[in-house]
């Protein structure tokens, strides 16, 4: 393994999400792991960082060109995040920057790469070291039709990594994580942040874009998402929908090329025909289960396990069996 420094964006820093733990796991296989935080790191978070082998945390301290301290939600704007990451790369002489694949993180990654004249890979499904020591990102492209490997040829590599790329694993032995301030001059944004609202999670469900298991409903639900939600609760899964179901007002978030792109370990599509738009947002899933009453539904062409039947009958039986097995 090449002796390199890998920076991981820690946002939010008040809690560590599964996607961040995955990034730390990937980073340890590439070199020395350091984190970049946009806000204060608490004791519980620091303990997790030590368990996952994070050697140090660069705590960003933002100020504008006039020296005025910048606090509040502006710290999470992509341009501000990019300024923090670029400053951390220069301070730590880092070689790799890893971010999650949220919309905001992708924009921040692009701005960071531009500031550093670095190579950029978006939505990597895996990150490794090539034979020549360069960073290689694996990707599924064209709606999951092709698997590609992209080698970064610049000195610094910036990558956003899809959730569920690896199973999070702590380091063999914990480290003593050090926290150090990172002065960051905030660029002239040209915009004013009016408000920022973090969407509350639905119960104990994981965020849709990060979930290891996703249960999605489509037009075949006829607007009744109760069986979909019940199965998701039994599995500890996130709930999604097709675009048509959202446009009908039956659910609030859809999976697709213009919606949320997911790559869970298990994707269950119930009452979803499998139109190209939808397939483009979920075809990279590791295992696909389809439930549909139409044996000619296109989703059956890409699924690993097919159930031909009415979802109102199939999903409650599956939820009951899962709960019985857990109990």
Image (cartoon, helix red, strand yellow):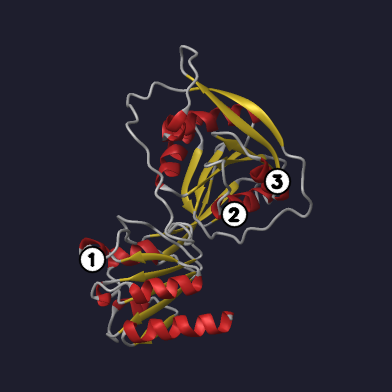
Disc 3/disc 2 C-alpha distance (Å):
16 Å
Mark 1 / mark 3, whichever is N-terminal: 3
User: Which is more toward the observer, 181 or 147?
Assistant: 181
| Relative side of 43 to 99, left or right | right
The x, y position of residue 8, in whole percent, is: 59, 42
Which residue is label 1 attached to? 244
Disc 1/disc 3 C-alpha distance (Å):
44 Å
The x, y position of residue 7, in whole percent, is: 61, 39
Q: How dense is the environment of label 3, judged by Cα within 10 Å: few (below 14), some, or many (20 and up)?
A: some
Q: Residue at x 27, y 84 (%)?
A: 296
Disc 2/disc 1 C-alpha distance (Å):
32 Å
The x, y position of residue 11, in whole percent, is: 52, 41
Q: How dense is the environment of label 1, judged by Cα within 10 Å: few (below 14), some, or many (20 and up)?
A: some
| Relative side of 133 to 174, left or right | left
Q: Can the viewer see residue 182 in this picture?
A: yes
**Relative to residue 96, is residue 172 depicted above or below?**
below
Mark 3 / mark 2, whichever is N-terminal: 2
Viewer-side label of 3, 2: 3
Q: Quadrant of the C terminus?
A: bottom right
Q: Residue at x 47, y 67 (%)?
A: 237
Which residue is label 3 attached to? 47
| Relative side of 242 to 22, left or right | left
Mark 2 / mark 1, whichever is N-terminal: 2
Q: Residue at x 39, y 49 (%)?
A: 199
The x, y position of residue 158, in whole percent, is: 52, 41
Which residue is label 2 attached to? 22
User: Which is more toward the observer, 212 or 281?
Assistant: 212
Q: Secondary structure at mark 3?
A: helix
Q: Can the viewer see residue 130 in this picture?
A: no
């Amino acid at each position: 393994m090449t002796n390199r420094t890998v920076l991981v964006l820690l946002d939010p820093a008040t809690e560590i999400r599964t996607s961040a733990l995955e990034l730390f796991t990937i980073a340890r296989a590439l070199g020395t792991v350091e984190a970049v935080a946009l806000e204060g790191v608490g004791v519980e978070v620091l303990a997790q960082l030590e368990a996952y082998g994070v050697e140090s945390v660069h705590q960003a301290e933002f100020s504008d060109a006039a020296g005025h301290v910048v606090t509040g939600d502006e710290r999470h704007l992509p341009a501000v995040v990019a300024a923090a990451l670029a400053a951390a790369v220069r301070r730590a002489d880092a070689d790799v920057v890893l971010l999650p694949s949220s919309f905001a993180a992708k924009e921040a990654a692009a701005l960071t790469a531009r500031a550093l004249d670095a190579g950029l890979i978006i939505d990597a499904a895996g990150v490794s070291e090539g034979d020549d020591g360069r960073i290689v990102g694996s990707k599924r492209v064209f709606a999951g039709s092709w698997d590609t490997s992209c080698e970064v040829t610049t000195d610094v590599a910036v990558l956003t990594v899809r959730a569920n790329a690896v199973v999070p694993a702590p380091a063999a032995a914990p480290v003593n994580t050090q926290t150090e301030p990172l002065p960051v001059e905030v660029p002239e944004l040209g915009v004013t942040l009016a408000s920022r609202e973090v969407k509350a999670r639905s119960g104990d469900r994981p965020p849709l874009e990060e979930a290891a298991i996703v249960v999605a409903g489509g037009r075949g639900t006829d607007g009744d998402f109760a069986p979909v939600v019940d199965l998701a609760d039994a599995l500890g899964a996130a709930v999604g929908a097709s675009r048509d179901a959202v446009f009908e007002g039956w659910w609030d978030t859809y999976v697709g090329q213009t919606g949320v792109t997911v790559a869970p370990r298990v994707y269950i599509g119930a009452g979803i025909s499998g139109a190209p738009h939808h397939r483009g947002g979920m075809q990279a899933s590791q295992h696909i289960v389809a439930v549909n009453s139409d044996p000619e539904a296109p989703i059956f062409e890409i699924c690993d396990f097919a159930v031909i039947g009415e979802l109102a009958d199939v999903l409650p039986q599956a939820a009951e069996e899962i709960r019985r097995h857990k109990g």
